[in-house]
Amino acid sequence: MANSIVEIILYIVCFVLSFYAISTVQFDKFCRVKQPAKVTLLMFLCALALSYLCTQAILALTIYNGLGV
């Protein structure tokens, strides 16, 4: 139970940090799209994928190896 709570909190924290980091990239100029909703969706999906990878890496180095809770 405690591992699940730690995983959920870590996913949320990594998502917020990755969305903050990705927001510095100007995807609207990179993609040359006139619709801002598509650019926002692209940023959201990239942040989601990056947060998943970061969370899995952190969990693999800590909890899954017996170093955590």
Image (cartoon, grey):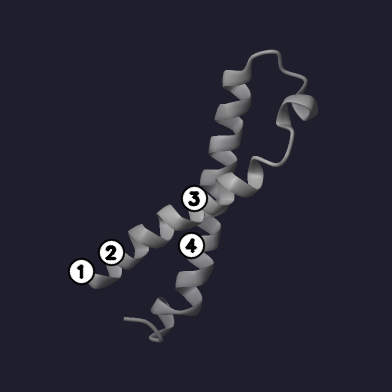
Real-space Cα separation, disc 1 to disc 4, in angstroms:
17 Å
Looking at the picture, how far across and down is residue 15, in whole percent? 49, 50
Label for residue 55?
A: 4
Q: Secondary structure at mark 3?
A: helix
Q: Foreground: 17 or 69?
A: 17
Looking at the picture, how far across and down is residue 19, in whole percent? 56, 45
Point out the image quarter for the C terminus. bottom left
Real-space Cα separation, disc 3 to disc 1, in angstroms:
21 Å
Residue type for callout 4:
Thr
Q: Residue at x 20, y 69 (%)?
A: 1
Which of pointers 3 and 4 lies earlier in the amino acid sequence? 3
In the rendered image, which residue does mark 1 sit on? 1
Real-space Cα separation, disc 2 to disc 4, in angstroms:
13 Å
Q: Secondary structure at mark 4?
A: helix
In the rendered image, which residue does mark 2 sit on? 5
User: Looking at the image, is 23 positioned above or below residue 18?
Assistant: above
Residue type for callout 3:
Phe
The reply, left or right, for residue 29 in relation to residue 1 is: right
Real-space Cα separation, disc 1 to disc 2, in angstroms:
7 Å
Looking at the picture, how far across and down is residue 26, in whole percent? 74, 33
Q: How many other residues sit within 10 Å of disc 2, few (<14), some (14-19) or many (≥20)?
A: few
Residue type for callout 2:
Ile
User: Looking at the image, is 47 positioned above or below residue 55?
Assistant: above
Residue type for callout 1:
Met
Label for residue 15?
A: 3
Q: Residue at x 41, y 53 (%)?
A: 12
Q: Residue at x 54, y 61 (%)?
A: 54
Q: Are marks 1 and 2 in contact (CB under 8 Å)?
A: yes
The single residue placed furthest to the top in the displayed view is 34
Real-space Cα separation, disc 3 to disc 4, in angstroms:
9 Å
